[in-house]
């Protein structure tokens, strides 16, 4: 019995954090975030060298062949630095969709490109995530038509993956005829959402409707776990910054961290947040190794960490006082990162609904 | 990350299954609570110690099973009894707090005399810590003990002494060095509750029961050798004891058990022909609580790994008492809300009579408040988390406030 990240997982997270802190100090973050595409070519290439994009790609296709727990450890580092890089959808969900639904030929066609950083896949859902806005897609043979809002990691995609209600997924080139991608800057300038419009676009079908639904649900589950991990990283940064600020800011002749009002606020953040890290690990480990618990934990971790993240984001900003509200400190990048993660792939209410269905408490 | 049990631990799990299958019928009812163990419970405890399912790591020389400390084994054992709903053996202040303290800092004679009878349940202990003027500020304790002719003479008053009305013995924090700074003037004594000069008055609480007492000392003679560690070392010893208490109060098994009980009730009870779990507002609250319990369960696994590696968990350990007791209260809150008016009738005759389902939930709900306060209140816990866990500065000392001997 050993409940912890492995040495390799910990070191990978640390080297990722170190690289991002070095390459993306606040001024660089502002510059990279401003366009709102969630993509910076220089940062992307550096992360390719670190092996981030091929984390889940099997070794035979040039990746590291690791699991969702490794992806969660990486996501915590990305959230901690509010990294301007496509990951949850492009690197984790698209890779898993290919592995779990794709044919060997499809895997061979796309996975090496993902690991090499040449392929970036935006992901949209027609249903399943409880998203607001249009979400319809239909297949006519291999031609895809429809309109999907809220697609993730589609600020600078080479391809698009659309998850259909029947359990199949469809892959198209982003520049194909009949495909239009309108990416929007969001509250979280580090990641966009996109509207995808398809008008008879040539598409490749992954999976079949009999095996698909469970496999596709597992792809969504992994995405939820990874977004929760990102929130834990971002919230930890907000807590750390609040504590550091409380130790240096003085009022009434004392550093404010010596006032119980501030100290207890910090203690509350730590008490809420610390168990979330273990929860993310367990949920991610369940994705890799405990199928019977995987779905329930994915729903619950997304919901609970989403709630805790919002509280930590609020309290940390409050501890910073008026400065926390300004743009000067840049604290709001993490606040908004957490807010984005909360809504994407289903907010807490939707995830708890899915958890209730999973336990047979209600009918879907 | 590897949650599989090793061969050794799987074998232990199988042994436990066999043990429970064979002997469960002899076990007393699980729960049972705050009363002197009856003969059936004492027999059960004896059997558990013989098999190493209680007092597992207490050395054989002191009447224990004498196994090396392996926290995963302890978790496997606790889990087997929880899963089976079978009485896991005695858990009281003597076993959970005094025994580990004596093992850590007691004299050989003290260990020989007290550990065996305590783990068997023959000797029941109570804790003499808090005073009317020394609650959160425990080190301000003023109960005096003066050494005269080979005895400490104790005078003063303790409060919140649970089980004092049936306990045989007390571990007592008292002031033996009144001229020294407050933390250095305390000593830790052990004494018989039958000593002349001790008066125990029950203290009724909001549960309607008297779980606690006030204990008064008038010229109570305690043999000088009944001191644990030396004079002026009492604060150090008391903190060893409190560390064990807080870990006990932050145990995530309690949360998991309570979540199961609550879930089962919402699935069973109906209002207007509809199961409670079908009511969206109740169901969503249950789901929120389930998420939180999951988080603490995973956190418990992390603490277990820290312990098995001998790592000090630091902040991770410091948050457990505050976090888990608050969550416990919210679990019982949903239960009493779900029971509605049908849950309001409440008759608590005595501590020993079991109530019906609604009464039990209400007793838990009230008692949870006590747990939030006891063992270092939530506000004190938040100071500890902030100061020791996050390294935030302490509150500056006020000058001119009567605070005993600072």
Image: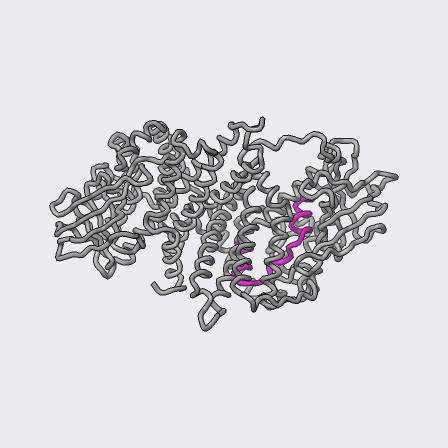
Q: Is residue A82 among what the camera can see? A: yes
Q: Position of residue B378 (x, y in %)?
A: 59, 45
Camera-side residue of B364 and A63: B364
Q: Is residue A152 above or below residue B183?
A: below
Residue A104 belongs to the span the image colors magenta: no
Residue in the picture at 30% in, 51% down: A219
Residue B86 belongs to the span the image colors magenta: yes
Q: Is residue A186 above or below residue B331?
A: above
Camera-side residue of A120 and B203: B203
Q: Position of residue B58 (x, y in %)?
A: 64, 49
Is B366 on the left or on the right of A232, as rendered?
right
Dividing the picture into quadrants, the one containing residue B348 is bottom right
Dividing the picture into quadrants, the one containing residue B225 is top right
Dividing the picture into quadrants, the one containing residue A349 is bottom left
Q: Position of residue A53 (x, y in %)?
A: 28, 39
Is B4 on the left or on the right of B384, as rendered?
left
Camera-side residue of B36 and A7: B36
User: How many labels, in total?
Assistant: 0
Residue in the picture at 19% in, 41% down: A158
Is B196 on the left or on the right of B248, as rendered?
right
Give the quadrant of the C terminus of chain B: top right
Q: Position of residue A321 (x, y in %)?
A: 48, 34
Is B397 on the left or on the right of A364, as rendered?
right
What span is in magenta? B76-103
Find the residue positioned furthest to the bottom.
B273
């Amino acid at each position: 019995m050993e409940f912890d990240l492995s040495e390799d997982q910990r070191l990978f997270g640390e080297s990722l954090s170190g690289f991002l802190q070095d390459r993306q100090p606040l001024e660089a973050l502002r510059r990279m975030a401003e366009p709102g595409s969630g993509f910076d070519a220089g940062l992307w290439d550096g992360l390719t060298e670190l092996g981030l994009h091929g984390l889940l790609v099997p070794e035979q296709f040039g990746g590291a062949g690791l699991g969702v727990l490794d992806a969660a450890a990486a996501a915590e580092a990305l959230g901690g630095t509010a990294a301007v890089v496509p990951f949850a959808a492009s690197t984790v969900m698209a890779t898993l969709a290919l592995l779990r639904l794709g044919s060997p030929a499809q895997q061979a066609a796309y996975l090496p490109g993902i690991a090499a950083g040449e392929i970036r896949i935006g992901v949209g859902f027609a249903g399943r995530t409880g998203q607001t806005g249009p979400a319809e897609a239909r297949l006519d043979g291999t031609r895809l038509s429809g309109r999907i809002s809220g697609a993730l990691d589609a600020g600078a995609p080479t391809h698009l993956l659309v998850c259909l209600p029947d359990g199949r997924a469809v892959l198209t080139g982003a520049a194909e005829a009949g495909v239009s991608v309108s990416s929007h800057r969001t509250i979280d300038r580090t990641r966009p959402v996109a509207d995808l419009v398809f008008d008879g676009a040539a598409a490749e079908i992954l999976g079949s409707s009999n095996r698909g639904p469970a496999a596709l649900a597992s792809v969504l589950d992994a995405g939820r776990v990874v977004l929760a991990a990102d929130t834990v990283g971002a919230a930890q940064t907000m807590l750390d910054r609040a504590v550091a600020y409380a130790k240096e800011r003085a009022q009434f002749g004392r550093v404010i961290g010596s006032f119980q009002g501030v100290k207890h606020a910090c203690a509350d953040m730590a008490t809420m947040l610390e168990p979330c890290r273990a929860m993310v690990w367990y949920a991610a480990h369940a994705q890799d190794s405990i199928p019977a618990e995987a779905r329930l934990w994915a729903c619950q971790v997304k919901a609970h960490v989403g709630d805790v993240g919002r509280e930590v984001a609020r309290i940390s900003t409050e501890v910073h006082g008026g400065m926390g509200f300004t743009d000067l400190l840049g604290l709001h990048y993490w606040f908004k990162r957490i807010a984005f993660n909360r809504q994407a792939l289903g907010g807490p209410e939707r995830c708890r609904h899915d958890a209730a269905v999973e336990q047979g408490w209600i009918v879907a | 990350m590897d949650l599989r049990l090793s061969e050794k631990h799987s074998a232990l799990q199988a042994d436990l299954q066999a043990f429970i299958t064979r002997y469960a019928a002899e076990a007393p009812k699980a729960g049972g609570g705050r009363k002197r163990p009856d003969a059936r419970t004492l027999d059960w405890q004896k059997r558990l110690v013989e098999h190493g399912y209680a007092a597992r790591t207490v050395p054989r020389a002191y009447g224990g099973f004498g196994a090396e400390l392996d926290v995963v084994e302890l978790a496997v054992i606790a889990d087997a009894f929880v899963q089976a709903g079978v009485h896991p053996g005695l858990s009281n202040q003597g076993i959970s707090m005094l025994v580990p303290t004596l093992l850590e800092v007691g004299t050989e004679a003290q260990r020989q005399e007290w550990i065996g009878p305590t783990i068997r349940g023959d000797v029941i202990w109570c804790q003499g810590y808090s005073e009317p003027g020394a609650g959160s500020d425990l080190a301000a304790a003023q109960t005096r003990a003066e050494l005269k002719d080979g005895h400490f003479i104790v005078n003063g008053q303790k409060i919140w002494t649970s089980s004092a009305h049936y306990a045989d013995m007390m571990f007592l924090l008292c002031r033996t060095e009144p001229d020294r700074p407050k933390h250095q003037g305390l000593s830790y004594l052990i004494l018989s509750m039958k000593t002349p000069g001790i008066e125990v008055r029950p203290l009724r609480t909001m549960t309607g029961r008297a779980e606690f007492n006030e204990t008064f000392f008038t010229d109570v003679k305690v043999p000088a050798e009944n001191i644990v560690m030396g004079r002026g070392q009492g604060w150090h010893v008391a903190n060893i004891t409190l560390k064990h208490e807080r870990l006990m109060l932050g145990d995530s098994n309690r949360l998991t058990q309570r979540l199961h009980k609550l879930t089962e009730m919402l699935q069973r009870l109906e209002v207007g022909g509809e199961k409670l779990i079908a009511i969206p507002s109740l169901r969503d609250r249950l789901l929120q609580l389930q998420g939180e319990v999951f988080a603490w369960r995973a956190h418990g696994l992390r603490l277990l790994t820290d312990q098995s590696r001998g790592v000090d968990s630091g902040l991770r350990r410091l948050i457990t008492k505050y976090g888990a007791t608050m969550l416990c209260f919210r679990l019982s809150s949903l239960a009493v809300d779900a029971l509605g008016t049908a849950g309001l009738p409440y008759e608590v005759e005595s501590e020993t009579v079991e109530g019906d389902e609604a009464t039990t939930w209400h007793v838990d709900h009230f008692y949870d408040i006590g747990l939030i306060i006891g063992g270092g209140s939530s506000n004190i816990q938040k100071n500890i988390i902030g100061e020791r866990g996050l390294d935030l500065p302490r509150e500056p000392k006020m000058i001119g406030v009567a605070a005993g001997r600072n």
